[in-house]
């Protein structure tokens, strides 16, 4: 009981440490696992581990292969949650790159790492290629924490995110085929077995995933599942899909749950966000337990096997040579720039799937007496720990070094997707600004998407927005909802992360009626609240531009917008096309230079010729 409670407590502490110091959680989790596992044998009186994952006759948490069954089921939940976050719209520009990364990149890593392991450590070809198959995978559990703290171009983030999720079942498939090669033997027997296993994994994985995704979606849409059972029914369905698919084809369950998650994530499902929140919380707990257990399961003798310069050489070749080669070959002919390819080649941390399957296959082959099998688990853990440590500590610096770090966060995050927000967002998008709308109203989000806008169904009271790597380039925040409390909350919570260049909200009714109460974060006009703006949009859903002559002309136009209820100032537009948001205290705002335009909403301003140029009369 003490060990079980200790794992959960230590795991959550590690998660907090990772959050506090902006590190991937895998790093403190593995270190804790090593401290309570193999390293503990150096300082305990009886030379035993503080936490023994597998029952050894005297102590242990899991009998036999129970640990690996638990690991497999936990990984299925993590990959399903990752699949839910994959949206087709994210890869409109980089789809071919991702496809090549999980095909060409996989081949390069498999053969490159296999040959290197064979010649560096003198391992048999079978064991070398089992090792290379296991380290093909990257994984969302390690990619996402690294990327969320680095403002990058959306395409770069999307490539790394999709690769991390899609390559997990591929790596597992390759590892299974190599394991079968070792178990069955070479020649015709293996060829037949490999082809059969490959076909079965693809067939059953995609079939089960696709079928159960639609079945569960149908049940949710028809309200066959009560709201309070939705999360647990979904969880049990994921486990059922994984187990059933795995029974028909070994290791096809990983592919099945990823397919299931991807299909459901791209459906118009009610409660999909609530389901995602639950899976994210569960994934955090499972990841915390898994990494501690797997690291603790390593023996000190395993670590001593790889404590030499050969390990350093193997790591260097895989990270600094094989990974970049795979990325550059995969991205050839794409829209990615050289420095973006360089950064993607640098970031390739391995995750939970590699560690879990390595522990399973390594122990099985050791028990069979396969020569060199004792190297599998420690070598894979070395790659996992080393790549995570390297990328977590250097990714931000390397992004700045190669020039992919966004120095200016010019994206605009709009809270609320009402008709007002959609009109403003569409204007900004047409003027080459990256705009994302956030709303918990699915109907508003769908209307925004039909206009070609990026829109996310989300609850701003949740922490999921801060984890969204697609929002890394957001530098401006505009809260445009009809709820004053939500607008104020959005400013207070997200100003530092998404509003570093400016965070604004609509003034509320009380502030409109109190001329002396003009908040510094007020937006557009002190005389226009949400109700007035929506009324203007209803009457005149048009955004106009008018040339500015000088500061006096600007002030005159602002006076007109104050007097006329159906005219609202929004932005100023510079000669080079850049746009600046007008705050509520418009008179204190001055356009810089000549050739500027005033961008406003509503009825068109009528300027008489004699007023505009009286000297010519």
Image (cartoon, rainbow, N blue to C red):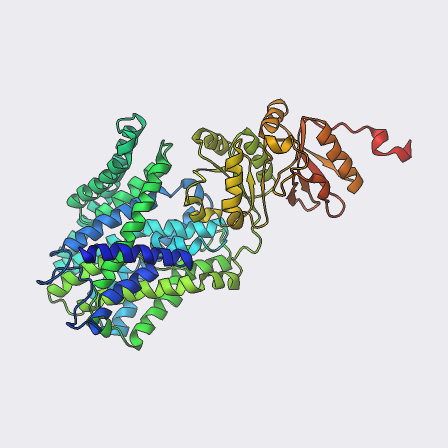
Residue 56 location, quadrant: bottom left
Image quadrant holding the C terminus, namely: top right
Depth check: give the residue in front, 511 or 88: 511
Q: Residue furthest top?
A: 539
Depth check: give the residue in front, 275 or 610: 275
Q: Is residue 501 above or below residue 135?
A: above
Image quadrant holding the N terminus, namely: bottom left
Q: Residue furthest bottom?
A: 309
Depth check: give the residue in front, 285 or 257: 285
Q: Pinpoint residue 460: horizontal percent, then vertical percent.
A: 45, 40
Q: Residue furthest left?
A: 57
Q: Pinpoint residue 265: horizontal percent, then vertical percent.
A: 36, 38
Q: Is residue 150 above or below residue 616?
A: below
Q: Name the residue located 18 percent from the left edge and 69 percent from the top edge.
A: 372
* Residue 480 shows in the view: yes
Q: Pinpoint residue 84: horizontal percent, then vertical percent.
A: 34, 42
Residue 353 location, quadrant: bottom left
Depth check: give the residue in front, 366 or 29: 29
Q: Is residue 368 above or below residue 150?
A: below
Q: Pinpoint residue 248: horizontal percent, then vertical percent.
A: 16, 43
Give the mark count.
0
| 499 left or right, relative to 83 | right
| 584 left or right, relative to 280 | right
Q: Is residue 439 above or below residue 350?
A: above
* Residue 94 shows in the view: no
Q: Name the residue located 42 percent from the left edge and 51 percent from the top edge.
A: 159
Q: Name the residue located 48 percent from the left edge and 55 percent from the top edge.
A: 150
| 24 left or right, relative to 505 | left
């Amino acid at each position: 009981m003490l060990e079980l409670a200790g794992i959960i407590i230590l795991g959550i502490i590690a998660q907090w440490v990772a959050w506090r110091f902006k590190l991937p959680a895998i790093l403190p989790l593995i270190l804790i696992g090593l401290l309570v596992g193999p390293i503990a044998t150096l300082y305990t009186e009886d030379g035993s581990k503080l936490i023994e994952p597998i029952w050894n006759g005297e102590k242990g948490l899991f009998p036999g292969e129970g640990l690996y069954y638990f690991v497999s089921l936990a990984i299925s939940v993590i990959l399903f949650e990752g699949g839910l976050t994959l949206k087709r719209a994210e890869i409109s520009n980089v789809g071919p790159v991702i496809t090549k990364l999980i095909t060409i990149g996989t081949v390069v890593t498999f053969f490159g790492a296999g040959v290197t392991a064979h010649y560096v450590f003198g391992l048999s070809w079978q064991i070398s290629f089992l090792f290379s198959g296991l380290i093909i995978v990257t994984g969302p559990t390690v990619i996402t924490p690294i990327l969320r703290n680095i403002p990058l171009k959306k395409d770069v983030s999307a490539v790394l995110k999709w690769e991390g999720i899609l390559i997990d079942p591929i790596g597992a498939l390759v590892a299974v085929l190599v394991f079968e090669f070792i178990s069955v033997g070479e020649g015709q027997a293996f060829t037949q077995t490999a082809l059969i296993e490959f076909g079965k994994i693809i067939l059953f994985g995609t079939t089960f995933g696709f079928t159960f995704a639609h079945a569960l979606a149908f049940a949710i849409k028809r309200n066959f599942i009560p709201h309070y059972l939705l999360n647990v029914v979904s969880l049990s369905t994921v486990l059922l899909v994984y187990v059933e698919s795995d029974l028909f084809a070994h290791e096809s369950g990983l592919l099945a749950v990823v397919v299931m998650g991807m299909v459901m994530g791209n459906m118009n499902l009610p409660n999909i966000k609530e389901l995602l929140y639950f899976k994210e919380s569960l994934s955090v707990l499972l990841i915390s337990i898994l990494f501690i257990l797997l690291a603790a399961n390593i023996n000190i003798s395993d670590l001593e096997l790889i404590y030499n310069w050969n390990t350093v050489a193997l790591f260097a070749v895989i990270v600094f040579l094989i990974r970049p080669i795979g990325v550059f070959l995969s991205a050839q002919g794409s829209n990615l720039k050289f420095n973006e390819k360089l950064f993607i080649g640098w970031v390739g941390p391995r995750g939970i799937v590699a560690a879990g399957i390595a522990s399973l296959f390594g122990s099985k082959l050791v028990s069979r007496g396969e020569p060199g099998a004792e190297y599998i688990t420690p070598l894979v853990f070395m790659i996992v720990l080393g790549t995570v440590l390297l990328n977590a500590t250097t990714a931000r610096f390397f992004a700045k070094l190669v020039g992919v770090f966004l120095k200016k966060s010019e994206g605009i995050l709009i809270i609320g997707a009402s008709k007002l927000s959609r009109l403003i967002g569409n204007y900004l998008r047409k003027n080459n600004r990256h705009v994302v709308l956030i709303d918990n109203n699915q109907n508003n989000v769908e209307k925004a998407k039909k206009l070609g806008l990026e829109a996310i169904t989300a609850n701003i009271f949740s922490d999921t927005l801060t984890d969204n790597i697609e929002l890394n380039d957001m530098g401006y925040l505009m809260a445009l909802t009809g709820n004053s409390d939500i607008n104020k909350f959005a400013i207070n919570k997200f100003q530092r992360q998404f509003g570093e260049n400016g965070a604004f909200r609509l003034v509320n009714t009380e502030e409109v009626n109190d001329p002396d109460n003009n908040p510094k974060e007020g937006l557009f006009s002190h005389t226009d609240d949400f109700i007035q703006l929506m009324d203007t949009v209803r009457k005149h859903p048009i955004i106009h531009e008018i040339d500015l002559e000088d500061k006096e002309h600007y002030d005159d136009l602002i006076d007109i917008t104050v007097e006329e209820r159906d005219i609202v100032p929004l932005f100023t537009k510079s000669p080079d096309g850049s746009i600046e948001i007008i705050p509520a205290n418009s008179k204190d705002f001055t356009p810089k230079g000549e050739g500027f335009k005033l961008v406003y909403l509503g009825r068109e301003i009528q300027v008489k010729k004699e007023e505009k140029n009286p000297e010519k009369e």
